[in-house]
Image: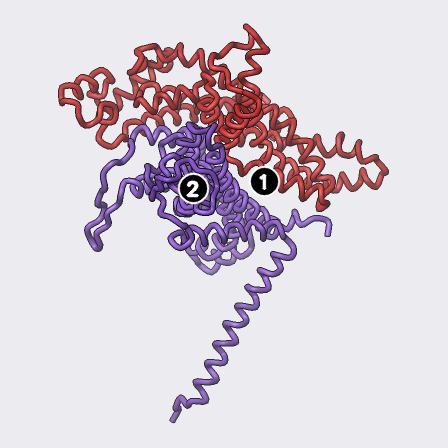
Chain colours: A red, B purple
Amino acid sequence: MGQYLVRRLVLLVITLVGVTFLIFAILRLVPGGVENAILGDQASPADFANLRHTLGLDKPIPVQYATWLSHLLHGDLGSSLVSHRVIGSDIRARLPVTLELAGMALVISILIAVPVGLLAAIRQDTIIDYGMRSLAIAVLSFPDFWVATLVITFGARFFGYAPPLTYIAPWENPVKNLQIMVPPAIILGALLSGTVMRLTRTQMLDVLRQDYIRTAWAKGLRERTLVWRHALRNAAIPIVTIFGIQIPFLFGGSVILEQIFSVPGIGRYLITAVNSRDFPVIQAVALMIATAVIVANLVVDLAYAVLDPRIRLG
Amino acid sequence: MAVTTRADLAESARYDEEIVRSFAVRWGSGLLHFVQHKPLGAAGGAIIVVLLAVAVFANFIAPYGYDSRDYNALLAGPSHAHLLGTDESGRDLLSRIVYGARVSVIVSIGTVTVATLIALLVGVTSGYFGGVVDLVVQRVVDVWQSLPGLVLLLVFAAMFGTPKTPRTILTVPVRIELIPAEIRAVQIIFLLGVVLSGGTSRLYRSATIAMRHNQFIEAGRAVGAGHVRIILKYVLPNIMPVVLVVATVQLGAAILIEAALSFLQFGIPPPIPDWGSMLSGSAAQYINRAPMLAVWPGLAIALAVFGFNMLGDGLRDVLDPRLRGRN
């Protein structure tokens, strides 16, 4: 286990460095130069030169990268071009909000998807199976922004529902916090549950075909014991990897939903920054999201190692 | 002397006819088989055929142009003249949805083509050669996958800005000039294709690894076939089922992401109608007076993606023998 952990952490560091490289490269590849994209064509050459100096773009590229990297390692993410606030503190305020949303959505999607997938697998090729599968595919075909718009539209019309405008942290007032977070979390979770349900079903089908299940069946075990004790345990391992695949989608989905429901998370921060061409913020948020995805993948891999002895011993 | 007589010509024509007919019978019976055994997949396929037909024949199907305004009917409800109503500028919603199909089809097919090509290149080489190449490439793919597609696209949107003027991209051999909407579409196709190819390359890589030690590859090497030939002749045709299934589902995913981008106003600029942007503009503002404006475009997106997913599901069931079920 120790060896696996070390290997995995080395991989983590390599990937993180690679991500900084990627983000750095992307934002330097702006056609016409970063200063052009920020200021537009109308600014004077003096303004351009000024901006270049402020952003440190007049230094050679390796120096820029090294400077940025050393700032990162000290926790300095720079400051916003628009509001001149320190980005680090903004992100520290907003990241937990997004994590709360994503976490709730993940839990909701598991709660919906795993039982349904199990049921569909046990009763394969029956009308329950077909119905559940079609429903799952229908659900994952819906665009999340459409469902969110419909919820707000028809919620306003028939229930007088309006998403609250100010955010309240869960430790201040849990009820109010849930009022804000639950609608987008349910939407995101429900839409994700389609994919998780289908993968659960596939993995369960795989496991149910195995010989040890057939042996247990022949031994005379009840179906319930069979499913819970033998099949589900073994199917749980690939299902955990499914979470790893879902994590980028979680963050992508929360970006839009935060925008629609006015939830102050980093997704909304990103969209505002893109609209105002606030490049330091865009850089920092992209880095944060990528880091969050990578760390979440690490957690998934560790859980995988805990559940499956073959991984940590082989 | 050997002369081609009229009888010879007639006979060869009959042979050709036989060949064509046997192809048709094989393809036709395969299709019939698919419809019978995988009705859900066939239903998805039918939806896609309708989508493609609407996109191709949009000019003939749409009752009005996508930007023609009827000032007598602003935010009108469904009526005889406007089957789905109009938006706040008096543009017929049905026509806009029909033309929007064009954007969705073009962008999704372009994107998946680019994504499949890149993913095959990266995944098959990585899986086939293994070793150091595999290690390095997989680390790059790791990094590539860590950014969600939408986030990366937003970053690119910030960089490129919205094109406003037409641009000429080629003068030889033929002059190609693109209007802003088309420039944007090309940008999205390439960027989204690159973004989507990351995860897909992993799938193609594992498919390649699964068949790396097959007998015919060994045999090919024994005969002296080079790597490229082996890959092209043996590996690629055998992973085609996987590619087919994945590409079908990705078509749906591409439509969703492109619609999300348009919803956030970073997609295809007006006046070209796009289902995503149709959901954001007037739909949000005129919620109370015309709520159905928010329903139809989203329904179109959902239906198209649903069709692709069902078709992909049906194909996967047919091509993956493990999941055939207890019969």
Q: Chain of mark 2?
A: B
Residue A220, x across and y down, in percent? 86, 38
Residue at left offset 37%, top offset 19%: A284
Frontmost residue, B275 versus B212: B275
Residue B136: image location, x then y, percent: 42, 35
In this rendering, position of residue B49 left or right of residue B175: right
Instruction: Give the residue drawn at x 49%, y 80%.
Output: B14
Location of residue B176 in the rendering, given as x and y in whole percent from the top left corner: 24, 50
Q: Position of residue B148 (x, y in %)?
A: 44, 30
Relative to A146, residue B130 above or below: below
Residue identifier under label 1: A137
Residue at x 50%, y 72% (from the top left corner): B20
Quick one: B139 or A208, which is closer to the camera?
Answer: A208
Mark 2 belongs to which amino acid?
A: Leu
Residue in front for this viewpoint, B27 or A301: B27
Q: Which mark is residue B93?
A: 2
